[in-house]
Amino acid sequence: MLVAGSDPRRPLLSRRTVIGLGALSTTVLLVGCDAAGLNPAEPGTTSPSSDGSIGETAASSPDRLTLLALAEETANLRTQFGELARRRAEARRSSRALRRTHDAQLAALQQLAGTTASPTPSPRPPGWQRLLAAELDHFLRLASAADDVEDGGVARVIASMAAGQGIAWETAAAKSVTPLDAGPPAGDQDALQEVLAAEHAAIYVYGVLGGRTSQSGQPTLFEELQASYLVHRARRDALTQVLRRQGVAPVAAEPAYDVARPPSTPAQVRAGAAALEEAAAQQYAALVAAAPTSSRSWAVAALVDAAHRAVAFGGASAPFPGAPELG
């Protein structure tokens, strides 16, 4: 949802005029199994429904081994960072966001797969830099797994985790993650059209936000808005080309969008941009679910980028960007 003004719940654009900015609900069916360091689940495991509640699952996921391996890796990192934090006060402060992300994501993986992950015993944790390198590798593995797994709902969850983990890594390392490689947009035509409609709206909103920002008075904010505007315009163009190659007429932008309350201060502009990127992350997460296996890299990269832009504009970091029902 796009926001402006002092009330963060008030939409900047009405739902009537913004097509496709809401997240598409996806049911993820996961069960546990035997794996190294993990206990098997009992029959009738659980999965998230569209409202975030937990319901019974009857079928097993074809990607359970991937999920279990990610759970074990997360458990290992959680244990090693926790041990280093107990030994060094500086590590405790710097790794706080990472450890919170580990806790949330491990709990979700265990609940979804019906498992309990047991970390590999380590007499002494690696040093800070080696652990940060291991975390960066974990982020890249999450992004790769989101592209490779068979089930679209599973891919959506893993891509969301990659985005949250990348944000936490940046906080700990005080660096930016390397942009992910991305192929062309993929997915069924309806999903691509919804994302394209959302990009039309996002471009319009960034025009409004930029028009409310002084290039001389707030040069940093103006540059951030301009950079984000160009990213969304490039994604609009990529989606348009893919649809035309499929012989489909791309959905057109509305002549105008109904702006409920344009922002009047830099703080409100930042809040509106952050909320716009949070909404975009949900749309990209839905596209991850709709795209075929090994064709999701564009959607995964867009989700990670949107999550990072939301935080850069002042939004709250979260372990599951784009999938708020996971908590």
Image (cartoon, grey):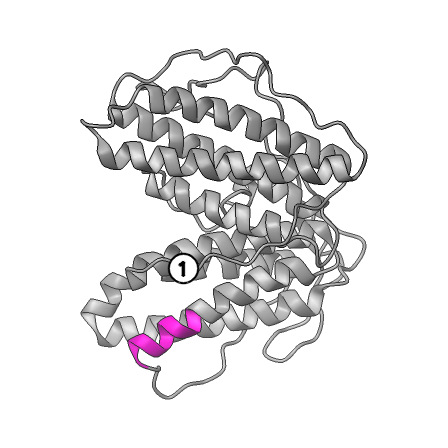
Q: At 45% from the left edge and 31% from the top edge, which residue is drawn?
A: 276
**Magenta stretch: includes residue 54:** no
Image quadrant where residue 207 sits: top left
Q: Who is closer to the viewer here, 144 or 65?
A: 144
Point out residue 18 in the picture as x, y percentages from the top left corner: 57, 20
Point out residue 14 in the picture as x, y percentages from the top left corner: 52, 15
Q: At 44% from the left edge and 61% from the top edge, which residue is drawn?
A: 102
* Mark 1 neighbour density, 10 Å: few (under 14) some (14–19) many (20 or more): some
Q: In this view, does 283 lie above or below 145?
A: above
Which residue is tagged 1?
A: 177
In the rendered structure, the answer to whether residue 33 lies left or right of residue 303 reads right
Q: Is residue 256 above or below residue 313?
A: above
Q: What element carries label 1?
A: loop
Point out residue 79 in the picture as x, y percentages from the top left corner: 41, 73
Q: Who is closer to the viewer here, 322 or 326?
A: 322
> Magenta part of the protein: which range?
127-135
Q: Who is closer to the viewer here, 173 or 251?
A: 251
Looking at this view, name the residue that lies furthest to the bottom: 123
In the rendered structure, the answer to whether residue 288 lies left or right of residue 211 reads right
Point out residue 284 in the picture as x, y percentages from the top left corner: 59, 41
The amino acid sitting under disc 1 is Val
Taking the image as drawn, is residue 1 in sight?
no
Q: Who is closer to the viewer here, 59 or 293?
A: 293
Secondary structure character of the magenta stretch overall = helix
Q: At 60% from the left edge and 63% from the top edge, which residue is drawn?
A: 144
Q: At 73% from the left edge and 36% from the top edge, which residue is drawn?
A: 243
